[in-house]
Image (spheres, rainbow, N blue to C red):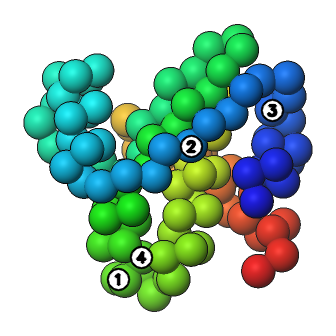
C-alpha cells in the first residue's frame, strides 16, 4: 500500500519507514519533539533522504469507529496523511486542513479496496 501512495504522491528516492505504536508511546514522541503532552494519530519526520512516520494504532482504532471505517482503512488514511506532511502540506489552519483532506481523498480513491 505504501508504495502505491508514494507513487501517486510522486515521492521518489527517499527511504520510508513506519512505526505502528500505542497512544502511550506516540505521546512520548509528541512531548519530546513538539512539547505537547497528548497522544496524536500520526507524526512525520522528513528530510531529503528519509521519511519516518509514526502512527498510533490506538488512535486509529478510536477514530475509525465513529467514521464507520475498519482499522485497516483508517491506518492507510493515516499513512497517506503522514506522507502528505512529508511533502510539506500542513493541517494547522482550516484552509490547509481542507486541502489535505482533498489530497487524501484523491489518493485513497485510487487504491484497490
- Circle 2 sits in a helix, a strand or a loop, which is it? strand
In the rendering, at what x and y percent does residue 79 appear?
59, 51
> Which residue position is annotated with label 3?
11
Which badge, 1 or 3, is on the more N-terminal residue?
Answer: 3
Which badge, 3 or 4, is on the more N-terminal residue?
Answer: 3
Q: Is residue 20 left or right of residue 38?
A: right
Which mark is nearer the camera, 1 or 3? Answer: 3
In the rendering, at what x and y percent does residue 60 appear?
40, 65
- Circle 1 sits in a helix, a strand or a loop, which is it? helix
Q: Is residue 56 left or right of residue 34?
A: right
Q: Are marks 4 and 1 in contact (CB under 8 Å)?
A: yes
Q: CA distance from mark 2 to mark 1?
A: 25 Å
Q: Are marks 2 and 1 in contact (CB under 8 Å)?
A: no
Q: At x 56% / y 74%, what residue is drawn?
A: 72
Q: Is 109 in front, or is 33?
A: 33
Q: Quadrant of residue 88?
A: top right
> Which residue position is annotated with label 2?
18
Which badge, 2 or 1, is on the more N-terminal residue?
Answer: 2
Q: Is 106 in front, or is 79?
A: 79
Q: State how many labels appear.
A: 4
> Which residue position is annotated with label 4?
64
> Which residue position is annotated with label 1?
66
Looking at the image, which residue sits at the far left? 37
Q: CA distance from mark 2 to mark 4?
A: 19 Å
One can see residue 102 in this view: no
Q: CA distance from mark 3 to mark 2?
A: 15 Å
Amino acid at each position: 500500500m505504501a508504495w502505491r501512495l508514494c507513487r501517486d504522491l510522486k515521492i521518489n528516492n527517499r527511504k520510508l519507514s513506519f512505526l505502528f505504536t500505542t497512544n502511550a508511546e506516540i505521546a512520548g514522541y509528541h512531548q519530546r519533539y513538539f512539547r505537547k503532552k497528548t497522544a496524536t494519530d500520526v507524526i512525520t519526520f522528513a528530510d531529503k533522504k528519509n521519511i519516518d512516520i509514526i502512527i498510533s494504532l490506538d488512535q486509529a482504532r478510536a477514530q475509525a469507529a465513529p467514521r464507520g471505517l475498519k482499522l485497516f482503512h483508517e491506518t492507510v488514511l493515516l499513512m497517506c496523511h503522514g506522507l502528505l506532511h512529508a511533502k510539506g502540506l500542513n493541517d494547522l489552519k482550516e484552509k490547509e486542513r481542507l486541502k489535505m483532506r482533498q489530497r487524501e481523498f484523491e489518493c485513497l480513491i485510487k487504491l484497490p479496496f
